[in-house]
Amino acid sequence: MSTTVPPADPAGDPLLAATGEQAWIEVIQKMDEVYNDLLQYEVALEEKNAALEESHQFIESVLASMSDILIVCDRNGGIEEVNPSLCHFAGKSAEQLARTPVFDLFADEVERSKARDLFARYAREGVHDCEFFLRAGDGSTVPVSMNCTPRVSQTGKLMGVVVTGRPVGELRKAYQALRQAHDDLKRTQSQLLHAEKMVSLGRLVAGVAHELNNPISFVLGNVLSLQRYAGRLGSYLEAVHGGRTDSLPALRQELRIDRILADMPQLIDGMIEGAERTRDIVDALKRFSAVDKAAPEEVDVNEVIERSVRWVTQSASGKFTVDLDLPAKMRCRGSSGQLQQVAMNLVQNACDATAGQPAAHLAISGELADGRLRVRFADNGPGIPEANLAHLFEPFFTTKPVGQGTGLGLSISYGIVERHGGSLAARNRPGGGAEFILTLPVESR
């Protein structure tokens, strides 16, 4: 006799019921976790897709904006990708060019053979700035400067090459435009330099006129004396030729002929000295105002500085004194006119800076050391504001009122000194006032 056992009723067993509910809770939690992971994965995937699309658009925009032609080839020379510049050059679409040999773009078989040989030998090293003739879309032959760069995989395997090129005609046009701009810049710089010279020259007219006045007045005085002496000598010679020998001794004493004869050599020497002094002043003025194109020459720096000081102080309004303490025979090699422009600019700036001082003063001292000469221009003015020190030698920078400064003097002076192999610096002195330091290489003898 068999007995049938009824199935267990979970509801009737509290332990079994609790176990079943816990299992369902764990399953639901796992499903939630998997769902959350799927959501996060989907979000991350969408972000990466968006970044990939943005990167793709960026690369396409760069390729489209390139003026140079670009060709991506496989290792056998088949075209895989081109940019719009090549399509425009070849007169074909990217689809027409795809999977065709890159060598078909070259003008003839000679150029194709040359390109095959060069790319085969130097594919891994790259080819730079090689000129080939390509066949344009209109059938013309165009010289192109080309570069070839290898494409390698992460394992170092050669995958192909990237070829870029630019028509040589465009390069020549760009070079000509660059050369023209360079020539224009040099011409403008020369004009600015000459204009600044003329501005400085205008300020010095009064000083030069004053310096010329002394020798000219001296020559004029001696000429007037000789004119009077000529009249007396004429009267005496008339008496000699007239046969009045009995009255000659008295006439000689009356006309002071002996004094005239003794005085004439001194008068003539004075006139020669005055004329030479005038000639030197005019020559210095011409050297300063002329555009210097001559070869470098030996320059007496002492003479340049002394002449600059003399011209500026004589044209300065008010009392402006300058003390000179320069060693003998300071010489360098270069342009006397250009270096005089530098010295005059520094002296003139010191004169302007000390205009409000009760006793305007500039001390110029020099020294020779280590194959270089160093000249210091130290004034007793208010000094240079710290904020302006870094901008002093910049073009068009000036602290003077409008109409009183071009802002080019120090900038041009800085360039002149640099071209002479020296340096020009500025600083404020601890005791007050500004100091400019001019350094130049000494002329080797």
Image (cartoon, rainbow, N blue to C red):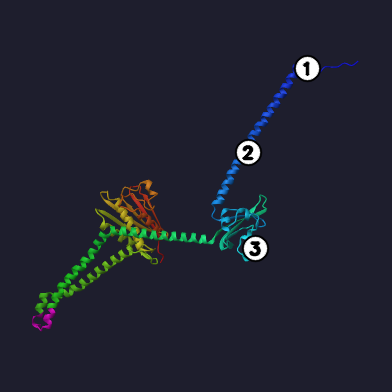
Circle 1: residue type = Asp
Viewport quadrant of the C terminus: bottom left
Viewport quadrant of the N terminus: top right
Counting residues from the N terminus, which is met first, the one under dot 2 or under dot 1? 1
Closer-to-camera residue (206/45): 45
* Numbered disc in front, either 2 or 3: 2
Q: Residue 334: x and y, percent?
A: 39, 63
Residue at image point 9% right, 78% down: 250
Circle 3: residue type = Asp
Residue at image point 44% right, 61% down: 180
Say which residue label 3 marks: 117
**Callout 3 environment at 10 Å: few (<14), some (14 to 19), or many (20+)?**
few
Left or right, 52 with respect to 359, comes to right
Q: Which residues fall within the magenta stretch? A: 236-248
Mark-to-mark CA distance, 2 and 1:
49 Å
Identify the image quadrant of residue 306: bottom left
Mark-to-mark CA distance, 1 and 3:
89 Å
Circle 2: residue type = Leu
Mark-to-mark CA distance, 2 and 3:
46 Å
Say which residue label 2 marks: 45
**Callout 1 environment at 10 Å: few (<14), some (14 to 19), or many (20+)?**
few
